[in-house]
Structure formats: C-alpha cells, structure tokens
Image (cartoon, grey):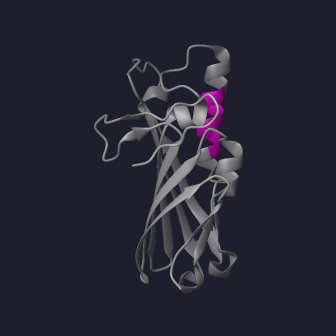
Amino acid sequence: MAAWSGPGRAATAHDHGHDRAHVHGLVALEVALDGPTLTIGLEAPLDSLLGFERPPRSAAERQAAEALLRHLRSGQDVFAPDAAGQCTLTAATAESEALQPGAKAGEHADLDATFTYTCAQPQALRRLDVGALLDRYRRVGQIDAQIVTPAGQFKQTLRRPARVLTWGR
C-alpha cells in the first residue's frame, strides 16, 4: 500500500491487527451497492483526521475529537453520491476505541465509520465525490477504495487533488 507524504509528513505504515496497514495520510473505503442500498465503510488512522492517535489530552483535543465524531455521525458533508442515483443518507456511525471515555493510550489508533444511503435509481450510480471529506480533513492525501456493484468489482486510488471515485461504464 502506498503512503502519502506531504509537507512535514513522513509516510509510515504499521500493522496493528486490522486488515490493512496503518498508513498516516490514507483513508480506506469499501463501497458496496446492493439493490437500492449504497454502503460506504471508512477506515482511517486517527492521525489522518485529527493529527493525533491517542486519547485526547487537552480540552482542545477533546473538542476536536468530539467535532470529528459529531461530523461523521451526522453523515452530512462527507460523501456525495452521483446525483443520478437519487440517494438519501439513512444512517451513519463512527467509532474509535481511543476516543472512548477511559481509553488507554495505545501505539496506533484508527477510526471506523459506516454511511448507508438508499438510492431511488441505484443503476445510475457511477461516481462518488469525496471532495468534502478531503476539504475538511487536510491531512488525508490518499484514498484507497474497493468498490463492489452489480457492474463488477473495482479498485481505485485517489491522490490529491483528485476528488471523485468512478466505476462502471
């Protein structure tokens, strides 16, 4: 898995028990279209979203962590499915063990989130705009996506400044 390194950022990878390597600056997406349901799973090192990957130590860090969870759990302004699919967000979750009350400091911490949409025209879906995610979380430099649709399975890697995942014909 490639890693992003930008100004002041070293690309690092650490295996920490998840299916993927822990790479700062990277977000992994699993996009699945099953009937009218579009599900987007997101996994990212907390460092890519917050700038730290341990329990918050200060009031400012606690506020940043709470804002991150509130934003992702709202599901608003994270992803924009192709307008042709006529998709409506129906559920969003976001969790990180490191951000739970009483969490112990660990070496590396991730955040896992899931976004579920119901689409009136799922056959028309051909793209997913991730620009809002990139705009809000500037430390994210790369998105690796696994996409499964009735049209097939696709892998795609986006690197800034790219903002849209595409699939199908």
Residue stretch rendered in magenta on the structure? 64-71
Asked whether 69 falls inside the magenta stretch, the response is yes
Q: Nearer the viewer, residue 115 or 166?
A: 166
Which x, y percent locates residue 17?
28, 37
Report the residue that reaches farthest toward the left.
Answer: 17
* Residue 124 percent coordinates (x, y): 59, 84
Residue 89 in view of the camera:
yes
* Visible residue check, residue 77: no
The question of residue 143 being in magenta is answered with no
Residue nearest the viewer, comparing 79 with 3? 3
Foreground of the two, 72 or 144? 144
Q: In the image, is 153 to the left or to the right of 130?
A: left
Please provide percent x and percent y for residue 160. Answer: 64, 52
Instruction: Identify the residue shown where x is 30% and y is 47%.
Output: 19
| Most common secondary structure along the magenta stretch | helix
Q: Is residue 110 left or right of residue 62?
A: left
* 132 in relation to 165, above or below: above
Residue at image coords 62%, 21%: 61
Q: Residue 83 vs residue 15: left or right?
A: right
Rendering coords of residue 142 (x, y %): 55, 50
- The residue at 41%/18% (across/down) is 105
Above or below residue 64? Residue 49 is below
In this rendering, the answer to whether 121 lies above or below 163 is: below
| Number of numbered discs on residues | 0
